[in-house]
Image (cartoon, rainbow, N blue to C red):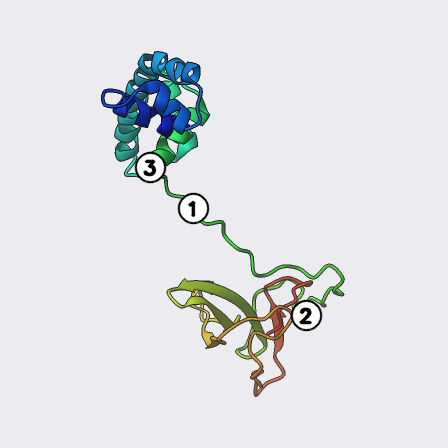
């Protein structure tokens, strides 16, 4: 309706206000009430512009990372008592937005009904000879083409420092459907090694 009143205000110098109101089906009293409220609206717009300037300064100072909650908190810290919804409206109208961190997805969810697997190595992550104790794990890496799943095998009989333990193998399947093996090409070891899964006894992912 404000657009209609603004049109009448712009055309009232060349056309009769009563005629315009009748043609546009609005009451003259409503139009004149809108005209009377214009100074207050202009003051609100000026206040919004001033607040928008402060918000922009804070946003740039944060390297364009702050969103509504942190901008509002900064304004309060500077003793600017403004409503959070007003801050949200001004930022939305001026396309000012913060950076939202993506929530990390957990892809190794335990199966509630799964029977716990036996701990074949008894939580002892040392080995006397190569090929006797192997551990495996799965990790996922974000790439431009989506998630890359990496399954690895590690021999616990590393030389000296545990950090020197040798990575035996790694596989990267194209996708990891729930409940299926991360790599259908199951590795066959030349020795009767014990393979421990580092994902947990109730994991739905198998190495």
Question: Which of these two is toward me, 201 or 36?
Answer: 36
| Dot in front, 2 or 1 | 1
Closest to the observer, 23 or 153:
23
Task: Say which quadrant the N terminus sits in.
Answer: top left
The residue identified by callout 1 is 101
Marks 3 & 2, CB-CB < 8 Å contact: no
Q: Mark 3 near mark 1, Cβ–Cβ under 8 Å?
A: no
Q: Which mark is residue 96?
A: 3
Q: CA separation, marks 3 and 1?
A: 16 Å
Q: Which label is found at residue 150?
A: none
179 to 104, vertically: above or below = below
Q: CA distance from mark 2 to mark 1?
A: 39 Å
The spot of residue 178 in percent (x, y) is 62, 68
Q: Quadrant of residue 142?
A: bottom left
Q: Nearer the viewer, residue 68 or 184?
A: 68
Q: Position of residue 97 (x, y in %)?
A: 36, 39
Give the CA separation, mark 3 to mark 2. 55 Å
Mark 3 lies on a secondary structure that is: loop
Which callout, 3 or 1, points at the residue further toward the start of the chain?
A: 3
Q: Is residue 163 above or below residue 51?
A: below
Residue 87 can be seen in this image: no
- The image quarter containing residue 148 is bottom left
Report whether 151 appears left or right of 200.
left
């Amino acid at each position: 309706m404000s657009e209609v009143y603004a049109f009448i205000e712009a055309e009232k110098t060349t056309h009769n206000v009563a005629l315009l109101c009748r043609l546009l089906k609005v009451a003259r009293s409503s139009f004149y009430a809108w005209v009377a409220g214009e100074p207050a609206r202009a003051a609100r717009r000026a206040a919004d512009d001033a607040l928008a300037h402060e918000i922009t300064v804070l946003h740039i100072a944060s390297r364009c990372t702050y969103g509504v909650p942190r901008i509002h908190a900064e304004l309060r810290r500077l003793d600017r008592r403004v409503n959070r919804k007003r801050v949200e409206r001004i930022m939305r109208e001026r396309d000012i937005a913060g950076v939202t961190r993506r929530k990390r997805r957990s892809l190794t969810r335990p199966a509630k009904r799964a029977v716990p697997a036996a701990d074949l190595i008894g939580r002892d992550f040392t080995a006397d000879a190569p090929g006797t104790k192997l551990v495996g794990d799965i990790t996922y890496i974000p790439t431009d083409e989506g998630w890359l799943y990496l399954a690895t095998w590690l021999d616990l009989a590393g030389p000296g420092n545990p950090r020197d333990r040798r990575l035996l193998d790694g596989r990267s399947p194209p996708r990891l459907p729930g409940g299926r093996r991360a790599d259908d090409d199951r590795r066959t070891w030349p020795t009767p090694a014990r393979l421990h899964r580092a994902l947990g006894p109730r994991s739905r992912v198998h190495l």
